[in-house]
Image (tube, grey):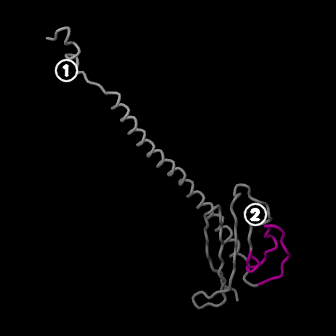
Amino acid sequence: MCASRETRRCSRQSGSRGFTLLEAIVAIVVISVALTGVLVAVRESVRGSADPVVQRQMLAVAQQFMEEVQLKPYAAAANAANTGCARTGFNDLLDYNGYSSSTVCAVDGTSIALLTGYSVAITVAAGTLSGLSAARRITVTVTRGGQTLTLTGWRTDFAS
């Protein structure tokens, strides 16, 4: 049994223990550092999660332009000049060569507001495809910010 003078010593030895102030501060610092690392990892993962959406939008825009170009006749025909990003006067494949627009527009030149920040460039060049000399290589490049997507396709003069 403990005497009254030894009460302090007895209570320390009786098995009740706790954290000292120094131990609590060290624990808080360690938890803070670990939590900071986790939050940095989560922030990087969230920032990169939008990239697939941008890539899909760029691919959809490139495919739409590629299809539009490939559906035009191979043989050159006279056409009217277009203004802005309109393509209503493009009536053959070669009309698209050198097309460049800092905005994505519909064929009639109407800007598509949801695709602000995207730009499109198209080149059409003569080429040989599997020994067939009457072929054109179509390259559609879509850019947004620092990201670029290039889609390449071919169109042959199968009708002649």
49 displayed left or right of 89: left
- In primary-sequence order, the first of circles 2 and 1 is 1
Report the quarter where the C terminus lies. Answer: bottom right
Percent from the top left, x then y, of residue 39?
A: 47, 44
Element type where label 2 sits in the image: loop
Residue at point 74%, 73% (across, down): 99
**Mark 2, residue position:** 106
* Residue 55 drawn above or below residue 67: above
Percent from the top left, x then y, of residue 152?
A: 61, 75
Residue 55 in magenta stretch:
no
Q: Relative to the observer, which residue lies in front, 4 or 92?
A: 4
Percent from the top left, x then y, of residue 50?
A: 57, 54
Residue 20: name its quadrant: top left
Residue at point 64%, 91% (across, down): 133
Q: Are marks 2 and 1 in contact (CB under 8 Å)?
A: no
The single residue placed furthest to the top in the displayed view is: 4
Q: Which residues are magenta?
A: 76-98
Name the mark on residue 32: none
72 displayed left or right of 17: right
Percent from the top left, x then y, of residue 146?
A: 62, 63
Residue at point 69%, 59% (across, down): 117
Report the predominant secondary structure element of the magenta stretch: loop
What is the distance, in whole Å, between disc 2 and disc 1 at their CAs? 83 Å
**Mark 1, residue position:** 13
- What is the three-letter code of the residue carrying label 1? Gln
Residue 97: name its quadrant: bottom right
Q: Residues within 10 Å of mark 2 (few under 14, many from 20)?
A: some
The single residue placed furthest to the right in the displayed view is: 80
Q: Relative to the observer, which residue lies in front, 130 or 34?
A: 34
- What is the three-letter code of the residue carrying label 2? Ala
Report the quarter where the N terminus lies. Answer: top left
Element type where label 1 sits in the image: helix
